[in-house]
Amino acid sequence: MKRNLLILPGDGIGPEVMEQVVRIVDWFNNKKGFDFQVEQDLVGGAAYDSNGVPLSDETLEKAKRTDAVLLGAVGGPLYDQLDFSLKPERGLLKLRKELDLFANLRPAQCFDALTHFSSLRPEIISGLDIMIVREATSGIYFGEPRGIIESDSGGRVGINTNRYTTEEIRRVARSAFELARRRYNKVCSMEKANVMESGVLWREEVTNLHKEEYPDVELSHMYADAGAMELVRFPKQFDVIVTDNLFGDLLSDCAAMLTGSLGMLPSATLGKIKKSGLPYAMYEPVHGSAPDIAGKGIANPIACILSFAMALRYSFDLGNEAEILETAIESVLADGVRTADLMQEKNKAPATTNEMGNCIISKLNETL
Ligand code: NAD
């Protein structure tokens, strides 16, 4: 059975970490008899350099046709002066918008071997397993009106609008409730209903949907600022957190630090189900293009590899294979192999990106 993957490595460390993912896709093809068909293309600054836009129409069409998109990272200082519409990040936002990828899934899971790496005490984070579901196609990053205008009294005004419809809230909340049913059956919805009308509507719609369709799932609500505090005070109280685009952006980065490094955090962004029965889907690490370490071959590829594991699980219904890959990673970490971002000991040389890939593939080979 052919399975199609569109790989968009992007900028900075994106191509470096994606190279390791391609090796793992090849491993599944060569050693496990799968038929993943990989096509690569450009996005972000790399696409701008080649085509003058951060995402070409042709690439967008390929993304619509493929079974799953795997993206590395976009952005970098070279592109900081570009017009807003041409910035690398617009390529990523356009993909999310055009594929209508409304539910961004960001797991924050603590690997046993890294418990001591977190800035929080081990007993607070050991065994942590949270899923943050962030609304990804609406809210303040897309709402109109937006822009910078001259103000009547001189000077300028910067405007963004946090706008949510009933349908947008309900569909992402539905994803969260469905996920919770497959996990520990708890959803905490976060907004700022105390000061924002969009938050009042969010809370009402989540509550209504819960009553109508998911009364068996435990639902709680929290203001997003209190949620940020609770995430670092006692994170294990949460199972699935559902929140809007802006708060989800902040809260998931906060959750990132619970597990130690941005280099460990995968994500999935899912949309509606296509005729093929698969959802529109894009998988990408949470981290950016890390210009400070790009080109040095020292980036941690695990977030990107775990993103592929999410693709195996959510796009291809290959949960067993996802688990094989996750277990291989866990076992490499348990052996003490660390890229520089995960190093605490000063007297040991960190693994390079490629060496980490080698170790994971060796562990995969042991499963044969
Ligand atoms: P970043 O995630 O790129 O880097 C933050 C810090 O974490 C840096 O010190 C970096 O070296 C480190 N880091 C990140 N990923 C790592 C990895 N895999 N291994 C080891 N260390 C890692 O965030 P930033 O510095 O705020 O942004 C840099 C650029 O990336 C900007 O242009 C930004 O717009 C873009 N960005 C893109 C995405 C994306 O493509 N999804 C996300 C965030 C930021």
Image (cartoon, rainbow, N blue to C red):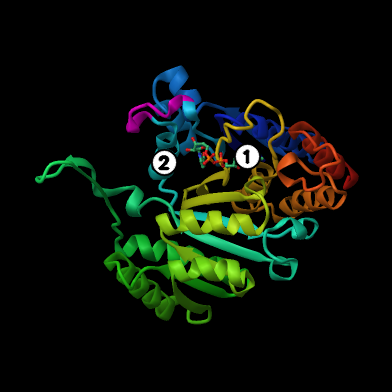
Image position of 187 with respect to 98: above or below? below
Q: Residues within 10 Å of mark 2 (few under 14, many from 20)?
A: some
Mark 2 falls on what kind of element? helix
What residue is disc 2 on?
93
Residue 73 as seen in the image, left or right of residue 121: left
What residue is disc 1 on?
3
Q: Does the residue tagged 2 have its C-beta within 8 Å of any atom of ligand 1?
A: no
Quarter of the image holding residue 212?
bottom left
Q: Which residues are magenta?
A: 78-86
Between the C-alphas of marks 2 and 1, the distance is 25 Å
Q: Does the residue tagged 1 have its C-beta within 8 Å of any atom of ligand 1?
A: no
Nearer to us of marks 2 and 1 is 2
Q: The N terminus is located in which quarter?
A: top right
Amino acid type of the residue tagged 1 in the rendering: Arg
Which x, y percent locates residue 327? 79, 53
Q: Is residue 211 visible?
A: yes
Amino acid type of the residue tagged 2 in the rendering: Leu
Quarter of the image holding residue 151?
top left
Is-magenta flag for residue 235?
no
Mark 1 falls on what kind of element? strand
Which x, y percent locates residue 103? 47, 55
